[in-house]
Image: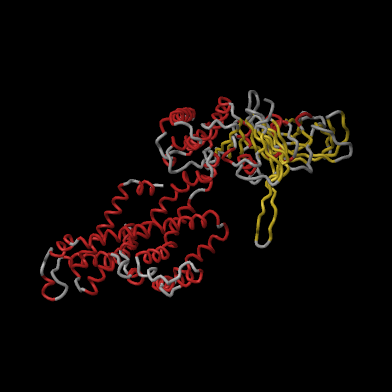
Amino acid sequence: MSEPAVELRDVTKVFASTRGDVTEEVYAVQDMNLEIAQGEFFTLLGPSGCGKTTTLRLIAGFERPTRGEIFIQGRPMSKVPPNLRPVNTVFQNYALFPHLNVARNVGFGLEVRRVSRSERERRVHEALEMVQLAEMSNRKPSQLSGGQQQRVALARALVNQPAVLLLDEPLGALDLKLRKAMQIELKQLQAQVGITFIYVTHDQEEALTMSDRIAVMNKGRVLQVGDPVTLYERPASHFVADFIGESNFFRGVVEAVSGQVVELRVGGARVQATASDSPPSPGQEALFAIRPEKMRLAVSEEDLGLHGTIQEVIYIGTDTRYIVSVEAQPPVAVRVQNGCGIAPQEYRRGEAVQLFWLPEDAHLLAD
Amino acid sequence: MEHPKRLLALIGPPGVYLTLFFLLPLGIMAVFSFRAGTIGEARNVFTLEHYRQFIANTAYHRLLWRSSLIAFGIASISTLLAYPLAYFLAFQAGERKLTLMTLIIIPTWTSYLLRVFAWKLILGTNGLLNTFLLSLGIIDRASPILLYSRNAVMVTLVYVWVPFVALPIFAALERIDRSLLEAAADLGCKPWQSFLRVTLPLSAPGIIAGFFFCLIPTLGEYVTPLLVGGGQGAMYGNLIQDQFVRALNWSMGSVMSLAMLLAVIVLLALFSRMGSFSKLLEL
């Protein structure tokens, strides 16, 4: 049972793009290695054009890898056409059949596989109950709202009890409130049916909300794979730190190393950060990132922390955001929660402050 | 206040055009159908005699029925041939789509008569087809029956109509969202199953449009039967033409024309009663 539901081994997909007389090779996916466990909610996250949808289409069989092999439940898929793969897809635009009503859309896969009529009707009904659309079974897709169409697409895929469900930005077309509700619903549904979900999105918050694990992609490559906490708390690269949530980046020169804790000189100040793998050696230049909410502002007589000046105070209800200018660094964002006993807008524009953080909240980055 | 004016400006000219050149002639034809004669005093005599004659003469009905069958056959064959053509253009031709489409359309820019005459040259006793079959030794004597037959009419009209029938089918196929075909494959369809379950039903409006596009004018066709049909290939349209041009019996010709109009309306009504027509157009 430890066999992965889906495994990608050195998968590369090259598209030839012709512009005028010049034919160019575009790497949509490059040397991708992934193992997705049975029953996992796995998300491919990245900006548009990063190759996440291509990866999903490779798994579904709509595209063939240029190199490498994809295994589903241990079986190599290179010679298996989409209709014979044990996966189903929820398409971005839902791709519901406009000429069939809801029940026949949902029953489509069962009908093709010649499941008996009574069995089919029972399973279609169950699937529609699951997405709370049982009373809509005679409607045409065009008579449904976007959210309802999305549920039909989900039911149409799940009714076939696939080993893996592929979802291509299924909530992208919904408004924010509905999207939030559907995120929770999808997550619960996945836990309930126990099917492996591979979910594609460019929305980092959505990915964090739903996923067991996330693969962050950029330019056809997987940059980091991890659970939401690891990705957010210990991003490995500049891209991941920047793409997931918000980060302040600092550049400094390494002065001393003790274990994983690295002491750096940033401008005139000595600060500390933590290396996730092998720490750099003294004298090297290094980049590190800190989340805005992991920073503290203080005014102290002693010459501690990073010195800066409050440049902007932005009050956003639950939080106050300070933009602090620091010598020879880009402006730093600090987020202070307006919690119990904290005065909103404690500091004023132009005030001199010091910036503090815990060494473990400052992450040295690979690039 | 602006709105009705603008609407009038928009539908006014085509309205006037349709009234002058379609409704008015139709009215004139209806009037003629009740006149005892085409010229002279008889013009002013009201009679139902021509209707009675038409109803009594079963030869007319047979020809109308046979012409309907021929038109139905031509429309069916044209649609069957046009569908793969349109399918290829829409799904397989890729970047050459427009070029190929243009190549198919270009012959239709030449005169209709010219294209029908071309078939005379192909099908004639000393024509291309006979010469070809003779040279291959498949036949040992030039066959005169290729030309001047019902088959010649059908071959010629199918040739004329295929590109036009392909157009609405192509348009319907082009409109099909390609992700629907991926969805069908994803749900277990082999390519032919995707075709039967998704492509074909979704292109039905185009098929129906192309079919009727061909059927209705073909029913009244008289030029092609005149040129390549001979006696056996004559159609109802030739009969009407005879009444107007040779017999100078405009009244009888009008009755026969109205009968054909009725036949077309009945045909369309039957088809839309079958439900598929209006239902498919809802898509």
Q: Nearer the viewer, residue B135 or A1?
A: B135
What colour scheme was applied to this rendering of the protein? secondary structure
The percent coordinates of residue A183 (x first, y second) are: 56, 32
Whether residue B143 is visible here, answered yes or no, is yes
| The C terminus of chain A, quarter of image | top right
The percent coordinates of residue B184 (x first, y second) are: 52, 42
| The N terminus of chain A, quarter of image | top right
* Residue closest to the far top: A340
Q: Residue at coordinates 53% horizontally, 32% vertically from top-left?
A: A160
Q: Is residue A345 above or below residue B139?
A: above
Q: Residue at coordinates 32% horizontally, 61% vertically from top-left?
A: B11
The percent coordinates of residue A103 (x first, y second) are: 44, 35
Whether residue A332 is visible here, answered yes or no, is no
Q: Is residue B121 above or below residue A229?
A: below
Q: Nearer the viewer, residue A341 or A166?
A: A166
Q: Is residue B65 above or below residue A55?
A: below
Left or right? Give the position of A291 relative to B241: right
Q: Nearer the viewer, residue B85 or A302?
A: B85
Q: Is residue A297 above or below residue B280?
A: above
The percent coordinates of residue A205 (x first, y second) are: 62, 34
Q: Residue at coordinates 69% horizontally, 51% vertically from top-left?
A: A26
Left or right? Give the position of B55 relative to A249: left
Asked which quadrant contains residue A171, the reply is top right
